[in-house]
Amino acid sequence: MRFRPCIDIHNGKVKQIVGGTLRDAGDTAEENFVSGQDAAFYANLYRRHQIAGGHVIMLNAQDSPYYNETRHQAMEALAAYPGGLMAGGGITPANAAAFLEAGASHVIVTSWVFRDGMVSYPALKELCAVTGRERLVLDVSCRKRDGAYYIVTDRWQKFTDERITERLLDDLCGYADEFLIHAVDVEGKASGIERELVELLGDWHRIPITYAGGVGSMDHLRQLREWGQDHLDVTVGSALDLFGGSLKLQEVLDFMQNIDRRRKP
């Protein structure tokens, strides 16, 4: 279990939002926190703490009037911490190389690989031809519907027909170095993690998975470690003191370090 930092950018600003409220129409979202610092500030902070594998997520669509500013912020973060961050949000075969060349260790992709609600393996192969499997992260963030978790695309607004199952993860892992999975229904609420989803993901551990959504306390981190069988990495957003929350970054890092110590013989 590792801590993965985040830099979420919306309308050109670093923010923490309630994930299920994001809308392309009007570029709106319910905001938990809007930072006065730019994305490079957070990238430099993570670099000083030597926290790698973080996610820079651009939350505006490419046709948004805010997209260029959001993209600029992302590029500044990647330049501040080369190789330490991954870039996601509107990634396609046409622009993936630009983010990798700008310093991203990986690109994070969801919407491009879906057609008509299903995974398009030709589209996935086209993307892999640009990035290579080793530099691609698949974002299979999901919401619950009819008692099951379904992948959502287009900044978490659109349900697909793809249900999160071990078989689906088996099929996709041959194309990706990691998975990133936001539990969108609890994203930004710091109200507790999705136990059913965490247990499902914890039973499957062929490639690394980062879980995000609902973490609001140290108890939630302990639950994630237990229910996920210590197989899941974690992102903490709104609850973190960096973003106006009460959970201290250093406390989270100390928790992770103690896990490492207990693992060593």
Image: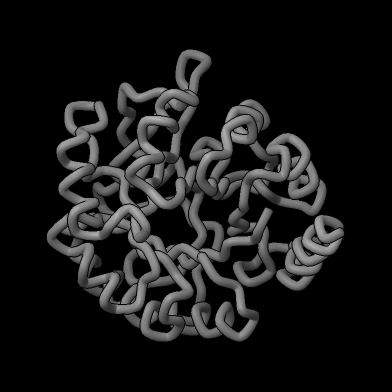
Please determine whether, in this image, residue 43 is positioned above or below residue 118.
below
Q: Give how far across and how far down residue 140 sits, in percent.
A: 41, 39
- Work out whether residue 81 or residue 89 is closer to the camera in this orientation and state it: 81
- The reply, left or right, for residue 153 in relation to residue 86 is left
Q: Give how far across and how far down residue 170 sits, in percent.
A: 43, 31
Q: How many discs appear?
A: 0
Q: Give how far across and how far down residue 182 sits, in percent.
A: 50, 44
- The reply, left or right, for residue 200 in relation to residue 207 is right
What's the residue at 43%, 85% (across, down)?
Answer: 80
**Does the rendering let one see residue 36?**
no
What's the residue at 31%, 50% (across, down)?
Answer: 109
- The reply, left or right, for residue 153 in relation to residue 183 is left
- Work out whether residue 133 or residue 215 is closer to the camera in this orientation and state it: 133
Q: What is the residue that sits farthest to the top in this orientation?
A: 146
Identify the colour scheme used. Answer: one colour
**Does the rendering let one see residue 199?**
yes
Q: What is the residue that sits farthest to the front in this orientation?
A: 265
Please determine whether, in this image, residue 33 is positioned above or below residue 102.
above
Residue 21 falls in image quadrant:
top left
What's the residue at 37%, 48% (across, down)?
Answer: 176
Residue 68 falls in image quadrant:
bottom left
Q: Quadrant of the C terminus?
A: bottom right
Q: Give how far across and how far down residue 19 sits, in percent.
A: 47, 46
Please determine whether, in this image, residue 167 is positioned above or below residue 56.
above
What's the residue at 36%, 71% (across, down)?
Answer: 104
